[in-house]
Amino acid sequence: MKKHELEKKLKERNINPYFYCLDGGLPNEAYTLGKNGDLWEVYYSERGNKSKLKTFLTEDEACDYLYEWIIRTEESMQI
């Protein structure tokens, strides 16, 4: 999926938009998608650091990975 499709799916699932960032950078405590040169990055941004950084060659792979990561995390936080 592409970034705009990912955003739509996250909104449809009512994921809090403060929980993620699709524009890269180092937002405070957010699951993040970014582009670094030719690579797509997915990571958790906290305290100015990229933790659990994974890189992908395609936007589709990165978006799919981030979506699954967010959904797994959301489901594990359910009571």
Image (cartoon, rainbow, N blue to C red):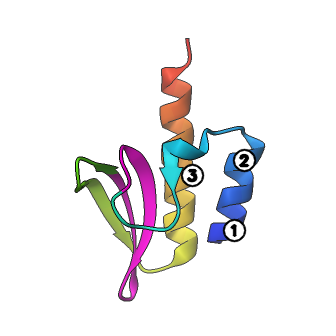
Disc 3 marks which residue? 67
How far apart in space, not on screen, are marks 3 and 2 (Cα)?
A: 11 Å
Residue 1 appears anywhere in the view: no
The region drawn magenta spans: 27-44
Determine the residue located farthest toward the right in the rendered image: 12
Give the quarter of the figure containing the N terminus.
Answer: bottom right
Relative to 72, say whether 46 is above or below: below
**Snapshot quadrant of residue 40:** bottom left
Disc 1 marks which residue? 4
Q: Are marks 3 and 2 in contact (CB under 8 Å)?
A: no
Disc 2 marks which residue? 11
Q: Earlier in the sequence, mark 3 or mark 2?
A: 2
Q: Residues within 10 Å of mark 3 (few under 14, many from 20)?
A: some
Q: Circle 3 — which element? A: helix
Left or right of residue 50, residue 19 in this image = right
Q: Circle 1 — which element? A: helix
* Main secondary structure type of the part rendered in magenta: strand
Q: Which residue type carries mark 2?
A: Lys
Q: Earlier in the sequence, mark 2 or mark 1?
A: 1
Q: Decide which of 31, 65 is in the foreground and name it.
A: 31
Q: Which residue type carries mark 3?
A: Tyr
Residue 18: where, in percent of width, then height?
A: 53, 44
Q: Earlier in the sequence, mark 3 or mark 1?
A: 1
**Snapshot quadrant of residue 6:** bottom right
Residue 57: where, in percent of width, then height?
A: 43, 80
Q: Decide which of 60, 48 is in the foreground and name it.
A: 48
Residue 19 appears anywhere in the view: yes
How far apart in space, not on screen, are marks 2 and 1 (Cα)?
A: 11 Å
Q: Which residue type carries mark 1?
A: His
Left or right of residue 38, residue 9 in this image = right
